[in-house]
Amino acid sequence: MVILPELVLVTGALAFFLLSLGKTPSEQTTKSLAIVVGLVTFAATLLSFQSQVTLFYGAYAVDQYSQLFKVMIGFALAVVMIFGQNLKGISISVRPEYYLFLLLSVLGLMMLVSSVELIAIFISLELSSFALYLLVPMRDDRTGIRVQMEAGMKYILFGVMATGFMLYGMSLLFGLTGTTYLKDILAYLAKGNLQPAVVVAVLLVLAGFFYKLAIFPLHFWVPDIYQGASNETTGFIATIPKFGAVALLIRFLTMPTGHPSFLIELMAVLALCSMFYGNLSALVQKDIKRMLGFSGIAHAGFILLGLLSMNSDGYGVAIYYIAGYVLMNLACFLVISHVSRQGENLCIEDFNGLYKRQPVLAFILAIGLFGLAGIPPFVGFMGKFMILTSALRADHLLVVCLAAINTAIAIYYYLSVVKAAYTADPEATTAVEVSPLVQLTGIVLVIAITLIGALPAQLVDFASTVAQSLP
């Protein structure tokens, strides 16, 4: 029961590996197995939620904190498997391999949220990353433009560069502290041992974390990878890996006493830069995935803003925010993957009159975008409100004011898509076909976005309590 989710993912990956060895399996077989693995993984995270143990000489911690993130990862994986069941952007001949690498990436993320030692963190991060690098160029681009190959090359080169920075920072931390365990490293930092070498080491390690979260200035991979990858792959990249990045960042920032002032100031500056750059760049985008990519950079800034308080309440709000962000993005990509007929990229104009062609999808898209824009009563509004409140309590008034301006900027480009879906005349007259299972999944996402937004107290309190239990 302790590592049940990880065992389910390994078993699912082996099943897809066996499928890839023989002749190409039927589309229905691959699709059914993917949905089953996604649902069973989510069920496994729920069954193992109460598990608490430390494994591998203290390097792997199964606690409430890690299990909370595993539940969220498992739910998001199940949704991705369901709405991506047709995989329009992936050739039938490579779909078993596609799901194999996707499950290995999720396995790495599951391991990452439980890792409390530098070597374990590095191995988990690389397992997740390298499996993900292979998903991007697997796109079957029927338009004849080989953008997926360029995106795949950029992703792996930028990723390896960020990994190199992080690994060098980890080696410096080990050399300075004599340990690879986060608990001991953080205790060393909390004592005020901030000679230049320590500051450089911390910044290099954070560079790797910020790259995964797409924080400015390590954001440059986002728009090209979002545009070059298939719609289903982009939906995965935009959601599930964010859980691992936030979980790891919070673990790294949890110190027994005190926090270096340079770290708080750095995070405040990077949060503002991410918000302004992401929102202003998203204003001029026509490709819907590039727009969501730039908006993701802005939302990463909000997550970083929630961590400025450096206490369990702020960490709890950040966990709440990332959970809501993933739900809203899943809703948007569910619609994108079905409106796209052959897996092609979509422009905002492609959603014109969507409410006439498929009213359920138009409704799901509108709720997802309303939430991302921060409109009440959805989770995006409550998440931004609590993050701004948390930062204000930590005496970051100027940062809060500038973040509020960014919230107003974001409303424009999100609502422009809703306007196209509900007020513009449809360019295509053919109805969009959606299976009952996908419609049900979309409605579940809508309910979750609304319910968690209207009743946030229990989830935030629980997340804060879990974060408070971190050593």
Image: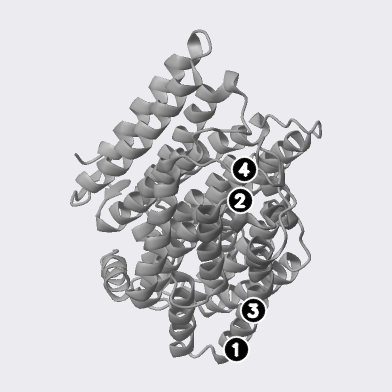
Query: Which mark identifies residue 401?
Result: 1
Q: CA distance from mark 3 to mark 2?
A: 33 Å
Asked which secondary structure carries label 3, the reply is helix
Is 185 drawn above or below residue 105 in the view shown? below
Q: In the rendered structure, which amino acid carries the disc numbered 4?
A: Asn
Kind of residue indicated by mark 3 = Asn
Mark nearest the camera among 4 and 1 is 4
N-terminal of the pair, mark 4 or mark 2, is 4
> What's the mark number on residue 231?
4
Distance, label 3 to label 1, CA atoms, is 9 Å
Across and down, in percent, residue 343 comes to 66, 37
Residue pointed to by mark 2:
357
* Residue type marked 1: Cys
Query: CA gap, disc 4 to disc 2?
Result: 20 Å
For mark 2, give the secondary structure.
Answer: helix
Q: From the image, state whether disc 4 or disc 3 is nearer to you.
A: 4
Cα distance in 3D space between marks 4 and 1 = 35 Å
Earlier-in-chain disc, 3 versus 1 = 1
Q: Position of residue 403 (x, y in %)?
A: 60, 81
Task: Tell me whether the residue at label 4 lies in contact with that at label 3, contact meaning CB atoms closer than 8 angstroms.
Answer: no
Residue at 65%, 38% in the rendered image: 341
Please report contact status of discs 3 and 2: CB closer than 8 Å, yes or no: no
Please report contact status of discs 3 and 1: CB closer than 8 Å, yes or no. no
Mark sitting on residue 105: none
Residue at image mark 3: 406
Q: Nearer the viewer, mark 3 or mark 2?
A: 2
Q: Is residue 41 left or right of residue 403?
A: left
Q: Between disc 3 and disc 2, whose residue precedes?
A: 2
Q: How was this image coloured?
A: one colour
